[in-house]
Amino acid sequence: MLVVYPYQTILEKNSTISIKVEADGFTIDNDLISFTAEASARSITIKNMVQDKVYTPKNGEKITVTLNGLKNPYTSDVTDSFQMTTFNLVDDKFFYWIDRVTTGLTINSKCNYPCKDCLDDDPSHCLSCYPEDETSEGSSSVIEGRPFLQEDTCVSQCAANRFYDGERCLLCDPTCLSCTGTANTCTSCGIAEFLYLHETKCLVECPTRFIEQQEKNLCVKCEGTCETCEGLATSCRSCNPFTDYKYLFRETCID
């Protein structure tokens, strides 16, 4: 059998393809079945499905092929790009085709891409994402990686005001413009009055010995022996009285 799977889905990168065949009316040894996959042609060739020399199907009998290793489709709409053809195999070569279905086939999938798993009643409400969501090697399909679960969808990266906790994109602390690792580990500031980043916190004003750099919303440490500074980190406004450089002269602390 030659299966041309539809454009709505692709093989998972580095995935392990598995096939199981079941039939009414005769026994199939799945260990005798072999297959090859061609990602560029979106096709999988399955050999030795019917192992009896003669098989005459009766009314209502069917052969069921279960194929694992494909990503969930974008949609489950009817598509003529989904095709199946059965062949007679002679001396390990396809001799003639027996039957062919090239129209009207549908994908029966619980979830739509980019979901890996989803709610039972909503194929686009994601519960998990593909961990390595990239275009399969040799595939002509172009897919943007979306390995991060954010609310009910999968995204290529978490939003600026969210961080990835290993399972999903969670909201940063309300004072953070962006964060990493945890909600309270701010990496940038600019929300309401919490404008200035000091270490990993967003502050209303910078602590002693730091100047507020408004262009980048940062707390910048005063240079040298300045106790406080203004305008520039090198422009001292007071000196530390407990050091040798405790006298202020022209915006510089001297001994």
Image (tube, rainbow, N blue to C red):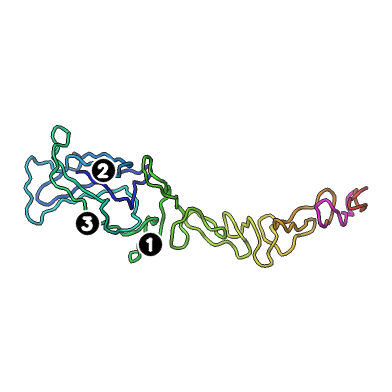
C-alpha distance separating marks 2 and 3: 19 Å
At horizontal 75% and vertical 53% (from top left) the residue drawn is 220
Query: On the rendered structure, is 24 left or right of 117?
Result: left
At horizontal 30% and vertical 42% (from top left) the residue drawn is 41
Residue matched to label 2: 44
On screen, residue 30 above or below 80: above
**Residue 126 point in image, percent of width and height:** 40, 60
C-alpha distance separating marks 3 and 1: 23 Å
Question: Which badge, 2 or 3, comes first in the chain's sequence?
Answer: 2
Name the chief secondary structure element in magenta. strand
Classify mark 1: residues with Cα within 10 Å, few (<14), some (14-19) or many (20+). many
Residue matched to label 3: 104
Question: Which badge, 2 or 1, comes first in the chain's sequence?
Answer: 2
SS assignment at label 3 = loop
The N terminus lies in quadrant:
top left
SS assignment at label 2 = strand
C-alpha distance separating marks 2 and 1: 27 Å
On screen, residue 233 above or below 192: above
Q: Which residues are magenta?
A: 230-243
Residue matched to label 1: 124
Q: Nearer the viewer, residue 83 or 54?
A: 83
Q: In the rendered structure, which amino acid carries the disc numbered 1? A: Ser
